[in-house]
Amino acid sequence: MILPKSNRLADSQLAEIAAIVTEFGCKIQPIIGAVRTIYAIVGDERDELMINRLEGLDYIDRIDRIQSPFKLMDKRSDLATHRITIGGVTLGEQFFVIAGACTIDPKNPNYFYETAAAVKEAGANMLRGGVWKPRTNPYTFQGDVKSMDILLEASHRTGLPVDTEVMEEAHIPVALNAGVACLQVGARNALNYSLLRAIGRAVDKRETCVLLKRSIHMGPINEFISAAEYIAAFGNPNIILCPRGTAPTLDGYRNHPDESVTPLLKEKTWAPVVVDPSHSVGKAAYVPACALAAVAYGADGLCIEAHVSPNHGIGDDPKQALTPEVLATTIKQARQLWALRRAAM
């Protein structure tokens, strides 16, 4: 990790260090922060000759080497002080809630508009809504790009920033150009490294964050953090880790709830953790308890499915979406528990 003496390198300086590391089979990836740019050495950084040449440049402050599988996401990296702010809320400093419908129904947009208003009234900070949807069965509803207009209209009406899932590279510019604040990577794509790279490269929208869900089939915690490393290594450090249940399923639940991985993640990475209790348990009646458990384990926020009339929802909403009343109570209790836990630290 290269730290220049100034806030960022001049083009000629960047070209000089890029030429040096290229000689040693590495490359440079700028990581642009709000006030400072740092420069990751992508590749094997152990060659002392390369490091000595770089440290000899008069515009370099220092070079930090982190012997870790994830050099950027590691809590010892120079991104450790990086903070993600969405809609005026800084994750880790204030409790953050994402809520909304699983899938936007383009034939009945009023349900989504009403849900959006209810989500805001309940105290959520960000509105979620599925434009494109991964489905196991190819004959079920796969989403509709026309729903992007509905999502943006709901954002305009409520003032809430929006989150939506992207499933392929072609979705990324559509979402970014529309002004989506958070790109969601679902559990099915959390190991899709080409997609993760593409999201990281979308650096023209550096303020956009990425909600990375944990794959159902991910094993060790390092595998989850390393997936986030792909996004950071290709340019976007605004990454939120989202546990959402894993395999094998637990009887009665949709997945095996994994909210307890939060302290394990925080031991290794600086990234904020926002837990999805809806997909963890898959049944609305169980979601509030799972949400509070996530907060007790140290989550920085929650991602909850909600619908003004769950039985009229499509996708997962009929089974696992909370009504506005239950959502409001859950958010209130979660914030109270978060404040108590923070006060005790």
Image (spheres, rainbow, N blue to C red):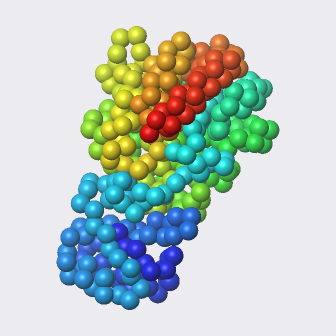
Task: List x then y, in percent, for residue 107.
Answer: 73, 26
Q: Residue at x 70, y 38 (%)?
A: 151
| Residue at x-position 31% and y-position 36% | 218
43 or 194, which is in the foreground? 43
Q: Considering depth in this image, is 131 or 222 the residue closer to the camera?
A: 222
Q: Is residue 189 above or below residue 248?
A: below
Q: Quadrant of residue 233?
A: bottom left
Q: Is residue 322 left or right of residue 301?
A: right
Q: Nearer the viewer, residue 343 or 35?
A: 343
Looking at the rendering, which quadrant does residue 68 occupy? bottom left
> Could one spot residue 133 in this view of the protein?
no
Q: Is residue 217 left or right of residue 330?
A: left
* Count of numbered tags: 0
- Residue found 55% across the figure and 46% down from its top: 93
Q: Residue at x 61, y 27 (%)?
A: 331
Q: Position of residue 21 (x, y in %)?
A: 30, 78
Q: Quadrant of the N terminus?
A: bottom left
The answer to whether residue 339 is seen in the rendering is yes
